[in-house]
Image (cartoon, grey):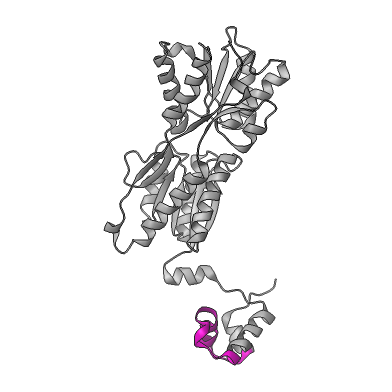
Amino acid sequence: MAQSVGIKDVARAAGVSVGTVSNVINRPETVASETRARVLSAIDRLGYVRSESARQLRAGRSRIMGLLVLDMGNPFFVDVARGAERAAREAGLGVMVCNSAQSPGEEAEYLSLFAEQRVRGVLLTPADATGRNIDAFRRHGIPFVLVDRVAEGTTECSVSVDDVAGGALAVRHLVDAGHRSVAYVSGPPGLNQVRDRRTGALNALAEAGLGPEALRELPTERLDVAAGRDAGARLLGLADRPTAVFCANDLLALGVLQAMFSAGVSVPDDLAIVGYDDIEFAAAAAVPLTSVRQPAVTLGALAAGLLLEETRTEESPRAHEHRRVVLQPELVVRRSSLAAR
């Protein structure tokens, strides 16, 4: 196994002190051009790579921001990561993106990894509904911002979308189109987003004089296309099948759409479908999908901005005030919900 090249090896090859090599790396303007060229030649020849992590540990300041999301297979979180990465890069930082896969256990492991790496701060979409993972992480003193989740009962910053309003937008649209019985493909009930979207759906039904029985909930263990197909199969088996379905995200909605297509059920003539997130694939589906749009890139960028603001003012905490930013969703109507009734 090849040995790594250290700064002492570079100093020896260039015939200079370790301090001179350090100056060439960190303060090149302080070193004579001839000496600097000799050191750089040695670095290139030996293949020396500076240990950035060691330098950061000595300085006590990491140049890495952690981002832990529920599912990197969901394009919504890819867009959140894009927004966060853009804001971090402008500040000279990198982003370590991790995927909890909606598992509280994996979330705890990644939070421990962030603590071990002494990251600058963490952007977190929680998978653990109990809050125990957050409580354990808080003891490390590393700043964090909740993403796609309101910071209820905590003092941290958060950036989220009003999911109650989003659920109401979706179901109000279906009610206005004449539907009086709506299925809700909801995802894991422990997720706040799933519960809030259900609350919004019930609010919209109540506005129309319809009771909670008008919403038939079909929970799923995951928020992916396969879970949507399974929910679609269950929906097809209902004797009194609703005429419309609202899904907690677009991946579920695309799975339901696939199940309807396979069974020969016409969308939207026999069943209207509305999703949530407005991922890129929503508009490109076989039947373009009506969806509640979340400003995912903006959400990620704002969350990163709040985290950067907090970490810049660590020496003067009063300069930073924790804030809860709540963005508004938007309904994007496409063919999947446009049949006249």
The correct choice, above or below, for 315 with respect to 111 in the image is below
- Is residue 191 visible in this depiction of the protein? no
Residue 35 point in image, percent of width and height:
58, 91
Q: Nearer the viewer, residue 308 or 146?
A: 308
Toward which corner of the image does residue 151 lie, by quadrant? top left
Residue 291 point in image, percent of width and height:
56, 29
Name the side, left or right, on which 47 lies relative to 145. right
Magenta residue check for 118: no
Q: Which range of residues does the magenta coloring cover?
A: 14-35
Name the side, left or right, on which 57 lies relative to 223. left
The correct choice, above or below, for 276 with respect to 216 in the image is below
Q: Residue furthest left?
A: 318
Residue 197 point in image, percent of width and height:
46, 27
Q: Quarter of the image containing the N terminus?
A: bottom right
**Residue at (66, 75) in percent of width and height:** 3
Toward which corner of the image does residue 2 lie, by quadrant? bottom right
The correct choice, above or below, for 60 with respect to 331 in the image is below
**Residue at (63, 18) in percent of width and height:** 268
Magenta highlight: main SS: helix
Q: Residue furthest top?
A: 239
Magenta residue check for 22: yes
- Is residue 303 visible in this depiction of the protein? yes
Q: Quarter of the image containing the C terminus?
A: top right
Q: Tally the numbered discs.
A: 0
**Residue at (48, 57) in percent of width and height:** 65
The correct choice, above or below, for 314 with respect to 261 in the image is below
Residue 335 point in image, percent of width and height:
63, 23
